[in-house]
Image (cartoon, rainbow, N blue to C red):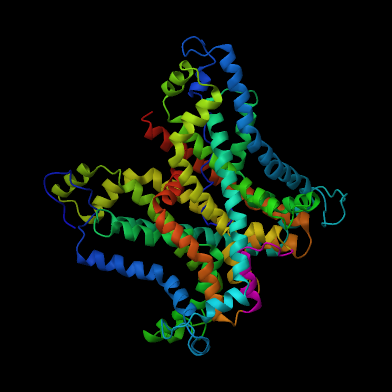
Amino acid sequence: MTGREGGRTKKPYAPGQAGPGRHLLLAVVAVFTLFPLILTVSTTLKTSQDVKVNPFGLFTSFSTENLVTAFTVGQFGDYLLNSILLTVPSTLLVVVLSTMAGYAFARLPFPGRTPAFYLVVLGLLVPFFAYMIPLYFQLRSMGLLDSLIGINLVLASTQLSFGTWFMRAFFTDLPVELEQAARVDGATEWQIFGRIMVPLVTSGMGALSVFTFLQNWNNFLVPLLYMPGGNYRPLTTGLYLFLGGRSVDIGPLAAGTLITILPVVVLFVVMQRQVTQGFISGAVKG
Amino acid sequence: MTALPAPPAAPTAPREPDETPARRGRRPPLRSGINDATRKAQRRLGILLVLPTVVIMAVFLLFPLGNAVYYLFVDFNGIDLAPPFIGLDNFAELAGDPDVWAAFRNNVIWIVIGTVAPLVLGLGLALLLWGVRRGSAIYRVIFFLPYVLPQVAVGVVWGWIYEPTRGWLNRVLDAVGLESITTGWLGNPDTALYAVLATAIWTAVGFVFVIILSALRNVDTEQVDASLLDGANWFQRLRYIVLPQIMPVFVMVTAITLIGGFAVFDLVFVMTGGGPAGATEVLGTLAYSSAFQLNRISYGTTLALFITALAVPFAVWLDRVQARLARERTGG
């Protein structure tokens, strides 16, 4: 839209002004972007007869039978629960441990600090790919394959470096005077951390939680590799299994897809500021 | 790291925080009022706070990484716990393996197109939305959404779009009179790689878009206005005023997208499994099938580390760019 005169400084203009043409173009791109989601919802809500004849025609019938089938025959209820059991504890672990370690690296001197810091940096540099195969055999000999605790720990370990580094930036930004004043008042180091510093970085912890939750929820490779037995199979590998076994059942497959993405979409739309913050700082801060 | 095309973990090597108050505390203790007892308490707390993270990272990252290096030089089949030492045979086999080079070629195509296309489209979208007020928040959510979706689900849905007879792509092509180019996009070896790649581009555009848009917010608008007065046209303003100001961020997002291209796995695995006839095989899927389907653990690990090594120069480059960005931000 054309700039408002006076008052606020004029907001930046892209090369060219925002006219109706630009809004039309944006709307077209938005529809194109959303089309796969629209298609998923449409196919999910069809009757099974309609799916057989015309699986991809948009909103030509209405029924919830595909959702019912996905939950009963497709076990997507179990997968949903398993996804929660694999994502919530690992996310909590990442947020709590990263806050702790981030504080230590930002503000405390301690022996072994430099090697510990290099370990964290190593985790930022080395992709999961590099060590995923040996990790399988290690987990096997530790008896952690197919276990909730093992997979939660692995998921947490893939995010801990980023989390620590992310939280450290928040603690580094806090003024020194805060802890000095608290120390003068007789607060212990533990109290300074727990009562004064942590409450000041809750926005960072919130962003990290949402970000980590999404990463772990979406993770495909970890459950694919380390849950060969299929106990606690989450939505991502559950959907893959369903795709392989019954790819003709497009209706329930669509419902399963919807069940897999819906929590992500809701979480993202509600918390989009935090999610974007996570991704942007992941990329921009150095 | 695993699922998403551009790993957010790409933020490389943060510098040691030399200027943190903790460090300063080592110098004259009186100045900040830190006495010996306090410092002792800080040390204890520091160790306590870092310990769980260090233990988890050591067990689930450092140890398997060390094992990966060991696997390079032996022939481990997953059963024999004392595998024979074979020196550099894994490397020799890799260098002479036509499957590896075919997969490598696909990775190169993936990296080039999968980097350039999202950059151009993401920049275009960001410029399109830049300065738009009404609805801007909604557009931001919509455009970024594909990037946060699980790739398995994305692969399933795009598989339907590419379906030969009933898929929307062929239906649209029919409708506009392009029947001649309709095909079974994922089943045709000539098109499969590009079809999967197009899906990846659909997910990656939003990432580039969001980063560039946030950089555009910092562009000096007075220069843009001044150039308007000087009669600069759309392209000149973009080329000489806007782009130079967002260039560091642009280069950085290039590097991140590029590095993500080496580790591509999920989408290919779900949509084509490397087929048809190896047409979409990339190094990632090849490493997976070597290790977990053919039980050639050592060879698969060699491939996985090969992928990692290929990305290293780009990671170093990214690190430099990020360091420069950080310096500019602090005005140093």
Q: Is residue B27 above or below residue B66?
A: above
**B236 vs B332: above or below:** below
Please tell me which residue is depicted at 57% across the width and 49% down the height of the picture.
A91
**How far across and down, in percent of the image, does residue B308 sit?**
63, 49
Q: Is residue B139 left or right of residue B277?
A: left
Image position of B98 (left or right of A165): right
Q: Is residue B30 magenta?
A: no
Q: Main secondary structure of the magenta part?
A: helix
Which residue lies at the image location 72% right of the left edge and 61% below the top edge? B97
Closer to the camera in the image, B181 or B129: B129
Q: Is residue A243 magenta?
A: yes
Residue at 54%, 34% (x, y): give it.
A102
Q: What are the residue bounds of the magenta stretch?
A: A229-246
Above or below for A107 versus B123: above
Q: Is residue A79 visible?
A: yes
Report which quarter residue A28 is drawn in. bottom left
Q: Nearer the viewer, residue B13 or B34?
A: B34
